[in-house]
Image (cartoon, rainbow, N blue to C red):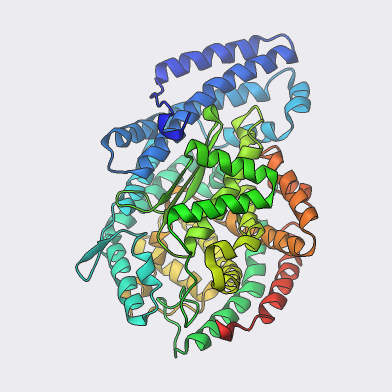
Amino acid sequence: MTFESFPYVRPDMAQVSQNFEEQLKQFQSAQSPDAQSVSLGRLNEVREEFWSMYNLCYVRHTSNTADPFYEKENEYFDEQLPSFEALNNRFFRALLSSPFRDSLEQKFGRQLFTLAELSLKTFKPSILEDLQQENALSTEYTKLKAQALVELDGERYNLSSIRPLELSDNRETRRRAAEAKWRFFDEHSDAIESIFDKMVKVRHRIAQELGYRNFVEVGYARMRRSDYTPEMVANFRRQVREILVPLASELYERQRRRLGVDTLEYYDADYKFPSGNPKPIGSPAEIVANAARMYRDLSPDTDRFFQHMQRVGLMDLVNRDGKAPGGYCTYMSKFQAPFIFSNFNGTSGDIDVLTHEAGHAFQVWSSSGFPFDEYHWPTSDAAEIHSMSMEFFTWPWMNLFFGTDTEKYRYMHLVGAIQFLPYGVAVDEFQHIIYENPNMTPAERNAAWRQLERTYLPHCRYDGNEFLEKGGFWHKQGHIFVSPFYYIDYTLAQICAFQFWTKDRADHETAWRDYMQLCKAGGSQSFLGLVKLANLRSPFEDGCVEGVVSEIRSYLDGVDDSKF
């Protein structure tokens, strides 16, 4: 069966609830651990069916947000997800109160019960309508961006197709393309700020109804963080601020000198070389064919995985109008099918997103044998280790995509990873500020973001663009709207991925063995447990950031970037 033939059937919530209740009753009345294990399997079949239909709908909706059928189906899930969460809430309560809990923990691992405890912190029936509103607002924001039209010189672009012009070799073209894109956000800023203001207020209301002072603790529980705290994250941000911000600034200064400009403006920041950024060779079909060759050579496991992705049609890679922007990987457990979604636009980002999302897909494919969805994926902080590390494990094959520009690409890729980290922690700190102060006005939120830019991104120069000078840049960052507190995860994972980069250069066999062990573990352990399993240092450990960065600095200092 191919993806196109995957049958979609809208889950009837009355029937889902009835099936769920029947299996839950059997679980609660079971007289032995073995009987409860059987009931757990049946319960999981009900949950698996629902989530598979949801993810199938999500893929088809984001592939074409103008499709009226899947738009209605997406609206249906926005309304029904809270009700399904209520069912899961009852399941988790029953699991935690099982008289055979010790036996079940031995069989399925402690992490399932930890996740159950965290889930109970985020839901009770009285917040059902607020959750529905939150879902609807997230959809509204996603649709607004997906249907964006950016006009320039009589042509119309979406937020993905405008990107090549933002990376043009002609500086004036870059400036005008960037201005046109940000003009769209400026013109829609009232709508975007209204959506976000409603989001913040509904999330604060949810937190208070659940008994918390603000949404921060709810956000951490939703992200299923069990072994680190906001205080540990703040200490990590401090290390990034002290160690990585100066290095990122040095790298931007090297870039300014390479480009020969007096000031590195915002429309120059992503244009790395006077000879132009490296661009992938070939059509999308040729890129996929080269990716298949790459994964065949990397390992027998990745070969089997990528052949499966191609054979079943589990990738939608090319940008088109009406398609949601960005990239993601999801999983439909009923079909044992990961799915990679992206928007190829002819830039090096096409290769970044392909290897990144393939890292996610390979991980969930490797851990699909676990009986619970909770173990198919790790928590997002750990999940991003697989994706970011895959970007580095595929370095030896970048010549297939960039030819003579391969060394240029590798330099840009590593520099970009360093320069991302200050931005990533700025997004995280911004969210802490927002949810600790839920009554801020839109102008105050923008001012808070602009101040964080001055702290973490001192290179930012906006060439008189009033919208960006007032702090509007964050409006484009979908995670802030749709997945609150999902961003520090990328930065923590990047520090881990850097460690895999170092290990791979020293001893590929050992590095790949550790990576495979991490992939196969899925979500069966917490973030720090998985970090330890992969023989990595915790990013929270004092000295870890500095140690990782010192090796990267040595590599970058050995590259003569003036020749690019």
The residue under the point 51% across, 78% down is: 458
In the image, 326 versus 188, the foreground residue is 326
- Can you say which quadrant of the picture contains the C terminus? bottom right
Q: Image height check: is 75 above or below 467?
A: above
18 relative to 552 in the view: left or right: left
Q: Image height check: is 302 above or below 85?
A: below
| Residue 472 in view here | no
| Residue 179 in view here | yes
Number of numbered discs overlaid on the protein picture: 0
Tell me where residue 217 appears, x and y as whole percent: 57, 46
The residue under the point 47% across, 13% down is: 18
In the image, 123 versus 307, the foreground residue is 307
Q: Image height check: is 131 above or below 42?
A: below
Q: Image height check: is 254 above or below 323?
A: below
438 relative to 30 in the view: left or right: left
515 relative to 351 in the view: left or right: right
In the image, 190 versus 490, the foreground residue is 490
The residue under the point 29% across, 65% down is: 186
Tell me where residue 367 appears, x and y as whole percent: 66, 37
Q: In which quarter of the image is residue 263?
A: bottom left
Q: In which quarter of the image is residue 83?
A: top left
Tell me where residue 30 appears, x and y as whole percent: 68, 10
Tell me where residue 248 appears, x and y as whole percent: 59, 76
Give the residue at the far left of this rendering. Answer: 154
In the image, 489 versus 162, the foreground residue is 162
Q: Quadrant of residue 447?
A: bottom left
The residue under the point 46% across, 57% down is: 434
